[in-house]
Amino acid sequence: MTYNFREIEAKWQNYWEQNHTFKAELSSENPKYYVLDMFPYPSGAGLHVGHPLGYIASDIYARYKRHKGFNVLHPQGYDSFGLPAEQYAIETGQHPAVTTEENINTYRRQLDQIGFSFDWSREVRTSSPEYYKWTQWIFIQLFESWYDRSANKARPISELMALFSKEGNKSVDAVCDDDTPTFSATQWTTFSEKEQQNILLKYRLTYLAETEVNWCPELGTVLANDEIVNGVSERGGFPVVRKKMTQWSMRISAYADRLLTGLDTIDWTDALKESQRNWIGKSVGASVRFNVVDFDAKIEVFTTRPDTIFGVSFMTLAPEHELVNAITTDAQRLAVEDYILATSKRSERERMADVKTISGVFTGAYAEHPFTKEPIPIWIGDYVLAGYGTGAVMAVPCGDQRDYDFAKHFDISIPNIFHDTDISKEAFTDKSNTKIANSQFLDGLDFKAATKSVIEALEKINQGEGKINYRLRDAVFSRQRYWGEPFPVYYVEGMPQMIDQNHLPISLPEVEKYLPTEEGEPPLGRAEVWAWDTQKNTIVHNSEIDHKTVFPLELNTMPGWAGSSWYFNRYMDPHNSDEFASQEALNYWQEVDLYIGGSEHATGHLLYARFWQKFLFDRGYLPKDEFAKKLINQGMILGTSAFVARVEGSNTFVSNDQINDKNVQYIHADVSFVNASDELDIEAFKLWRKEFSDAEFMLSEDGSFKVKREVEKMSKSKYNVVNPDEICETYGADALRLYEMFLGPLEQYKPWNTAGITGVSSFLKKLWKLYIGDSGLKVNDAQPTKDNLKTLHKTIKKVTEDIEQFSFNTSVSNFMIAVNELSVQKCTSREVLESLLILISPYAPHIAEELWAKLGHQSSISTAEFPVFEPKHLVESSKNYPISFNGKMRFTLELPLDLSKEEIEKTVLAHEKTIAQLEGRVPKKVIVVPGKIVNIVG
RNA sequence: GCUCAAGUGGCGGAAUUGGUAGACGCGCUGGAUUCAAAAUCCAGUUUCUUCGGAAGUGUGGGUUCGAUUCCCACCUUGAGUACCA
């Protein structure tokens, strides 16, 4: 009986499905454990071997936890709204729902063959109306909420309205737009309905506002900050420009501080927390208001160095600053307008590319220093960003390098306000070493004391106060796309109205084409049945719009991150049609215990999901305000690309060791044509592309043709993709699972190399042979020998530690060692071999199940109890502990692992005499290391 | 520029309360088996060596009886972020 993995794997995958082996039940005697993967976007290309890495790791952990007696929730689903399906639809006319369905089927087939222990009965798809009904519902809740700063949580908007009618908005400490007017209770009641709604929009956690957005003309949509990389769109790499548009936004800035402090309560990697901290970008400083000379206006600036206020020698406004036009003098107007025009023409990318060039222009206006009352020239310059702080800075050239460079360039004075420092070459920016001078009441103070003192002084004259500023911007929530969640919103006289939650979902309408309309409206502008009848509470044909009872619906759709910001809660109760999840389910499963996914979502998905979680927690819908206790970022598996060298301008290819000084260009060759010794299958390569069919090949001396290898990201265009289907077909799913883990640490980037899989493949064969011989089962009820038990318990100890620390790669090595040792020991003991199977079962579940059944068990191995390490089996059997001497005054005693510190010391003392005799001297120092070895230093 | 992570054989990588560096696998070399190949099994595989040994975990210092591990400085690579006031 040989190891037939194809038969075994199909058999057990079928068994698990038939028996609902991995179905998670709500009530259980056992403690719960929730293991989650970041759900995939089902792309048309299917899975490559890099994709399942994280799923294998989480699956091992989930299976391990089941063995440990936990009630494990391990679901999977699809983030199925997204751009590629829509772009494919634009090209082919194929409905995105159709391609998405096809892609999901491919994904499911590929996932199934790897033998994951997912509870598929809980599958969710963000693009299904049953799911996005609740995404729309959450949107409505956000609309119906405001953020109360004093209570530090979100509250219903009805409570805000009650406050307004009682005491106006003066005493309400809420997060709202900067331009919100102050009003009294009586004023509020005299406002028209529309005026009231307009004011409420300034408070709602999702709001409609004209904002400057990142517009991507190529994609025809706006993008959030995290969807832009190096000034171009993350998807497609198209240019992005700034544009004013009316858009839905999410008031995530209200949660900036809690998103920051919450990081301290969760077990995520430091790197990830750090990038979220950077993204939120908290800076502590002060807000200072400068009066403009001869002009009724104030310029507000934010600074982290209020202590340097006496070093201000000019101010700089962003070219887009709203006061620029008003304060510019006639003499300077032409120059200023030229400058603004020139900077507005430069794209975001150009502006980023040459940060070194200093440019700016004087407005002719002056501000007044709050303390010295001296005039300060006001400049504009594009080193000041409109989008950060107030878009204006107080320039302190002696204490800030950019201000310094600007001052030098335009020959502005650089007063030195630091005691005993040289600023002739560069600014002095060291906060910790600051001693202020030439600064009136601040003289002699350090950074901390001066900051405190100056803020008090500013508050006294009402020209500033201490302030905390965040880099985090509100997130734009509208996308001009078809394949996304529709908003549950219709418009009455331009004011957005929420559709009552009883009438959700608002399903995506059919359109003829998936492109924007000729008038530049989003694709939903093409829908003919896309109006809301407020009487019948249904969607009706556009022709019925009368603006009395039938109104137009919102044409934008929600961004990709909407559906992924709460899906982990839906898995707890995925088929509930009355609530997004029942309180019972939420209270039982609470939160994700272990979340595994890529670090590329650090400032997107993982931030937005935390935001929604906190919001739903505030409103009493969730028991926890962080959704994932522990998070691990799996690294990427890279491809090993193959390149063939072609002599420049010819059709002659040169083996990589024959290039010498020839002028060659390298071309990607499909990795399937190359063997482990980097030799190219020339015939296959010739057949690959027409242009290569009559190519010449200069071979190396041994007659082979060598390629150049390079490690790159795995991608279709680099011809280095390895498909898991082929691996499963040739080596089996268990071999794939083991090998992906064996490649290296989970969190690390590492190259794939198919050749190495023979190692784990032969391990599986050896494992099989340990149990099954030519004449059948080799296992019997023989008493385990001491060596058997030693091998077993050594392995239990190591593997348990490995799993708890997510060092899955070393476990595989430990299995190989164990199987080799037990083979040499000719172990046939049922007791030992059964335990070993359970250890291996999370990693290689199919073969473990098969052997488990062959050992006579009726039930699945998945429920078997994980073996417990017993230290006594690692006790040395020999009477005399070996004493070794390495020539450097070091003695080593090998001792049992389960001795206490006292016992070890006793043993050591017993050996002291022997040691002393050996060396003729008494040990100076005894170093006791419990559980390991003992060192005696002579 | 700033922040973070990492540098160990031909390759992926082991080894951390500081204690025999290179586990395990790939590849390579030799052998057994075979008509032959695949598969399998056995032995070897850090470098240098006068075969006694010696050196060795990016570089240079430091702490220690002892450092891949801890500290300082530097170099290199990767990732994130960037005129953030």
Image (cartoon, coloured by chain):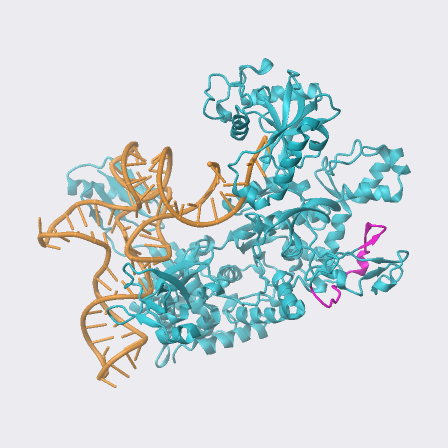
Chain colours: A cyan, B orange
Q: Between residues A820 and A683, which one lies in front from this camera angle?
A: A683
Give the x, y percent position of residue A599. 52, 51
Relative vertical location of residue A466 with respect to residue A753 in this rendering, above or below: above
Give the x, y percent position of residue A162. 84, 39
**Is residue A910 rendered to the left or right of residue A760?**
left
Give the x, y percent position of residue A678. 33, 66
Examine the rendering and report whether any part of residue A212 can be seen. Answer: yes
**Is residue A704 rendered to the left or right of residue A463?**
left
Pick the quarter of the image with the N terminus of chain A.
bottom left
Name the residue at 26% across, 72% down.
A703
Quadrant housing residue A23:
bottom right
Quadrant housing residue A682:
bottom left
Name the residue at 75% across, 24% down.
A296
Give the x, y percent position of residue A249. 71, 47
Examine the rendering and report whether any part of residue A785 can be seen. Answer: no
Q: Between residues A880 and B84, which one lies in front from this camera angle?
A: B84
Residue A637: in magenta span: no
Q: Give the range drawn in magenta.
A: A490-514
Name the residue at 40% across, 60% down.
A743
Name the residue at 60% across, 68% down.
A104
Relative vertical location of residue A20 with respect to residue A804 in this rendering, above or below: below
Residue A509: in magenta span: yes
